[in-house]
Image: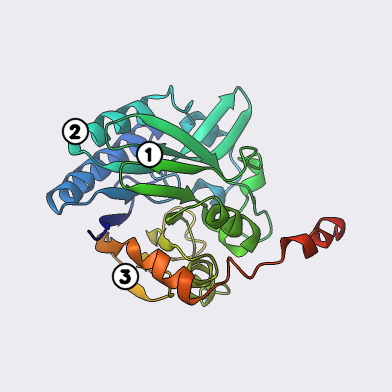
């Protein structure tokens, strides 16, 4: 019997301007997403991922400590608890990217993974933190992740998570594949310009090189008052052959829904024996090449 999983991705514009009180901003985005999650449930979605730090704007456009106040503990915080209830209500696996406070003054860019029965399974913390372009001042807000690259056994299959800038680094994507990930989700906040052409290139390449499905999410539009760039949406799912199965528009809220045939993973790995033909005994040299 075929293993068909219906996947979903949400890209959404903030309904409350970033100049408004923080709690109003946060609640507005949470309420909006609850509605879109309900729509996903109506469409039969079984696993759903939200965009990077879904409950607010991409505040890394500036360096302002006020945004620390939007952080929460994971899983003890109210948003993770709410999403556990939501997952249980809709019998849906949820990947929920939030701003995590580990302790006072220590913060991570994190995604909580919640099973379809509402059980919190664990979290991934963004490993690679950029601080190199105007508008991407992430080291001001986040420590580099320290949990490695976990793969979560969920009701629909094995799920791995990468976050935004991570996608430029093939090493973690490989580890997720070697750990058995069948679907890797990559929530992002990526603006148009220099790196846009990599959006399809890199993430489809991860899918091909490692033999899994990728679902990647991007923000949409401009976020005043910064307007340093325009997020170009274009969230999509691709299969282990690198084929894009479904893709969102560049400029509007959208729920991307498509069916993922997990049996294709075995077919592709048998045809393209990239896993078999690896030579890990010859790769240790990479550890000595420190730059």
Q: Nearer the viewer, mark 1 or mark 2?
A: 2
Q: Nearer the viewer, mark 3 or mark 2?
A: 2
Q: Residues within 10 Å of mark 2 (few under 14, many from 20)?
A: some
Marks 1/2: CA–CA distance: 31 Å
Residue at the spot 36% in from the left edge and 25% down from the top edge: 78
- Percent x, y for residue 31? 24, 38
Q: Nearer the viewer, mark 1 or mark 3?
A: 3
**Helix or strand or loop: what does disc 3 sit on?**
strand
Question: Mark 3 or mark 1, which is nearer the start of the sequence?
Answer: 1
Position of 35 with respect to 248 (left or right) is left
Question: Mark 2 or mark 1, which is nearer the start of the sequence?
Answer: 1
Q: Residues within 10 Å of mark 3 (few under 14, many from 20)?
A: many
Question: Mark 2 or mark 3, which is nearer the start of the sequence?
Answer: 2
Vertical relation: 150 (above or below) 43: above
Res 263 quadrant in image? bottom left
Marks 3/2: CA–CA distance: 27 Å
- Numbered circle sitting on residue 89: 2
| Label 1 close to label 2 by CB (< 8 Å) | no
Vertical relation: 259 (above or below) 41: below
Residue at the spot 39% in from the left edge and 30% down from the top edge: 120
**Helix or strand or loop: what does disc 1 sit on?**
loop
Vertical relation: 56 (above or below) 199: above
| Quarter placement of the C terminus | bottom right
Of 269 and 149, nearer the camera is 269
Of 258 and 20, nearer the camera is 258
List the residue tagged with mark 3: 247
- Numbered circle sitting on residue 20: 1
Position of 258 with respect to 203 (left or right) is left
Q: Residues within 10 Å of mark 1 (few under 14, many from 20)?
A: few
- Percent x, y for residue 280? 72, 61
Of 264 and 252, nearer the camera is 264
Marks 1/3: CA–CA distance: 32 Å
């Amino acid at each position: 019997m075929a293993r068909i999983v219906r996947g979903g991705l949400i890209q959404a514009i903030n309904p409350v301007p970033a100049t408004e009180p923080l709690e109003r901003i946060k609640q507005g985005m949470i309420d909006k997403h609850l509605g879109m999650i309900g729509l996903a449930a109506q469409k039969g979605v079984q696993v759903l991922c939200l965009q990077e730090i879904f409950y607010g704007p991409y505040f890394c456009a500036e360096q302002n400590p006020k945004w620390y106040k939007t952080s929460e503990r994971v899983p003890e915080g109210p948003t993770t608890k709410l999403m556990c209830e939501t997952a249980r209500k809709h019998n849906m696996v949820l990947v929920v990217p939030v701003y995590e406070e580990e302790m006072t003054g220590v913060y991570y860019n994190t995604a909580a993974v919640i099973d379809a029965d509402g059980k919190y399974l664990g979290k991934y913390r963004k490993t690679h933190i950029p601080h190199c372009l105007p508008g991407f001042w992430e080291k001001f807000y986040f420590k580099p992740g320290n949990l490695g690259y976990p793969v979560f056994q969920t009701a629909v299959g094995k799920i791995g998570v990468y976050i935004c800038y991570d996608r430029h680094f093939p090493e973690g994507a490989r580890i997720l594949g070697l750990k058995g990930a069948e679907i890797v989700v990559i929530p992002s906040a990526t603006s148009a310009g220099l790196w846009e052409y990599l959006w399809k290139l890199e993430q489809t390449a991860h899918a091909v090189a490692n033999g899994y499905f990728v679902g990647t999410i991007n923000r949409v539009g401009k976020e005043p008052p910064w307007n340093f760039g325009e997020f170009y949406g274009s969230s999509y799912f691709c299969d282990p052959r690198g084929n894009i199965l479904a893709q969102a528009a560049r400029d509007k809220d959208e729920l991307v829904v498509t069916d993922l045939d997990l049996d294709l993973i075995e077919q592709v790995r048998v045809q393209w024996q990239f896993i078999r033909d690896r030579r890990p005994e010859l790769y240790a040299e990479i550890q000595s090449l420190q730059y």
